[in-house]
Image (cartoon, helix red, strand yellow):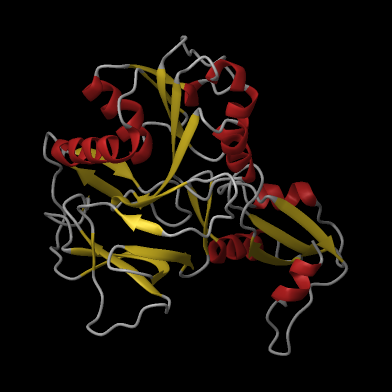
Amino acid sequence: MTPTGTRTHGPRTAARDEIRFDTSGSTGVARRWFRLPEQMELEVQMIGDHLVGPVDRVISYAPPQHLFGALFGQWLPRTAGVRVHQAWADPFAPLPVSPGERVLVVCIPMAWDLLRRGRRALERASAVVALHSSAAPPPSARALARRAAGLLRAHEILGSTETGGLAHRPLLPDETGTGLWEAFPDVSFVRADGAPSRRAEELVVRGPRLARPETGTRPPGQWATGDLVEFTGPRTFRYVGRGGSLVKVNGIKVHLARVDEMLNARLPQTECAVLPLPQDALTGEGYVVFWSGRRGGTGVADIRAALRDVPSPSRIVKLADIPRTSTGKPDRRALLAAL
């Protein structure tokens, strides 16, 4: 992701009241971002009023060192004066839900299967709202929404450390993740004059909640997210995908070009190809490593060890040869057909 528009240069010491966040596990160089308390309060109030409503207890599976977890696992319960259970610290502990409580669950992809297992405890609540961010929801999210219809309302939030929440949509039981996103009220889009609708373009935004980078003295005037979207109206869009080779595994950014570099550097005698694998059942998104063992001496354990600095691939597939196109690039279609 890259900032656009007006920028300020030169490092600045963080103000005493700023809150620091690091880019969430990117395989590139980590960067620091700073947010003011009023930005945190604005986001909590806006999303709380817009999507959540009154709650009596928060159950958070998102660690507070990430913006999503800090906002809804710390700031919201503190602001609302309600109890919070930090489920990320012990994900398999029983859910502490009292009869009749209104519960907010802060979800990352792995949370949904745990909620399915703890469904009986959730059913003690009078109402459950789930907020999902940090990568696409896994199939278990829609399955739970279907089984708990009438009790559970779920919303997806599109955003990042750099921008905060940008847009939202309901997480419905019977959709496949292709529904329209609607911008939050304080977010505006930056588009070229006369830009056509229904054509993929990069999502560039303005708003009062953009974070300050460590190299600047103030937040950028606008931010290019790196996401490709098709605008369907003044405030709505269809998400197309990420520009470049980027996926998120349980909310951690993984640049697949960097994964390729690691494999080539650490396993020079092994031929590998890496492809995104969306809608992984456990992590929401993922990637697959194809490898050829023609030269011998390499196994699955070696590939996992070579990728020790990034989240593990969802699948590792051994092939006799890596199929390639006439230009020598891995043949994506043939590789996916081998799954």
Q: In this view, does 99 lie above or below 187?
A: above
Q: Residue furthest top?
A: 99
Is 11 left or right of 194, judged from the image as shown? left
Q: In this view, does 54 lie above or below 149?
A: above
Depth check: give the residue in front, 37 or 296: 37
Residue 83, percent from left and from top: 34, 15
The quarter of the image holding the C terminus is bottom right
| Residue at x 79% of width, y 58% of height | 317
Residue 169, percent from left and from top: 41, 50
Q: Is residue 130 above or below residue 183?
A: above
| Residue at x 48% of width, y 13% of height | 97
**Marker count (numbered):** 0
Residue 234, percent from left and from top: 27, 68
Residue 128, percent from left and from top: 45, 27
The quarter of the image holding the N terminus is bottom left
Evaluate whether residue 237 shows in this view.
yes
